[in-house]
Image (tube, grey):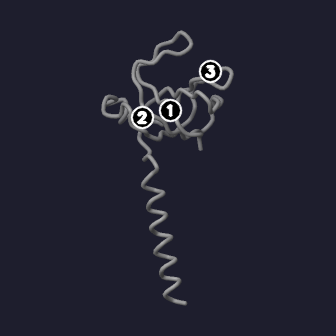
């Protein structure tokens, strides 16, 4: 019985490690803004408060402020949170993006539902 418990515990630890290895690490917006080229095409997670948002028909753009800086997030199929809401989002960094007649130098294109 003890050997079975040890095997199950080891299996659980290995599975948890694999799950955590697949999650993008949380990155500060200041680090991204300092060197956006380093992050282009990479998946990152940012978190903070929504300071501005607009959208329609399931697509939109919102700005997150994490206390170190701000970044616009493009959401194509995950909806747009309201101003003042806390949000953590994961996506890919892109440069030279336009939406709704406005241009954005660096944005995060959301690839996963917010948590």
Element at badge 3? strand
Mark count? 3
Categorize mark 3 by other alpha carbons within 10 Å: few (<14), some (14-19), many (20+). some
Which label's residue is closer to the chain start, 1 or 2? 2
| Residue, far right | 57
**Residue placed under numbered mark 2 in the picture:** 29
The residue carrying pointer 2 sits among few (fewer than 14), some (14 to 19) or many (20 or more) residues within 10 Å by Cα, namely many
**Horizontal and vertical percent position of residue 42:** 39, 37
Q: What is the secondary structure assignment of the residue under circle 1?
A: strand
Marks 1/2: CA distance?
A: 8 Å
Q: Residue at x 45, y 51 (%)?
A: 22
Q: Is residue 89 left or right of residue 25?
A: right
Figure check: 79 above or below 24 = above
| Earlier-in-chain disc, 3 versus 2 | 2
Judged from this view, the residue extending furthest toward the top is 101
Q: Which residue is mark 1?
A: 65
Q: Crowding near pointer 1: few (<14 within 10 Å), some, many (20+)? A: many
Q: Tell me, yes or no, whether the two marked residues, 1 and 2, touch with CB atoms within 8 Å.
A: yes
Relative image position of residue 46 (x, y in whole percent): 48, 39
Q: Quadrant of residue 86?
A: top right
């Amino acid at each position: 019985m003890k050997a079975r418990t040890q095997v199950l515990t080891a299996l659980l630890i290995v599975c948890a490690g694999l799950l955590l290895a697949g999650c993008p690490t949380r990155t500060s917006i200041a680090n991204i803004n300092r060197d956006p080229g380093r992050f282009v095409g990479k998946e990152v997670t940012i978190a903070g408060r929504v300071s501005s948002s607009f959208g329609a028909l399931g697509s939109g753009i919102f700005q997150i402020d994490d206390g170190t800086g701000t970044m616009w997030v493009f959401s194509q199929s995950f909806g747009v949170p309201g101003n003042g809401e806390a949000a953590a989002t994961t996506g890919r960094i892109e440069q030279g993006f336009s939406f709704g007649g406005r241009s954005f130098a660096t944005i995060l294109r959301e690839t996963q539902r917010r948590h």
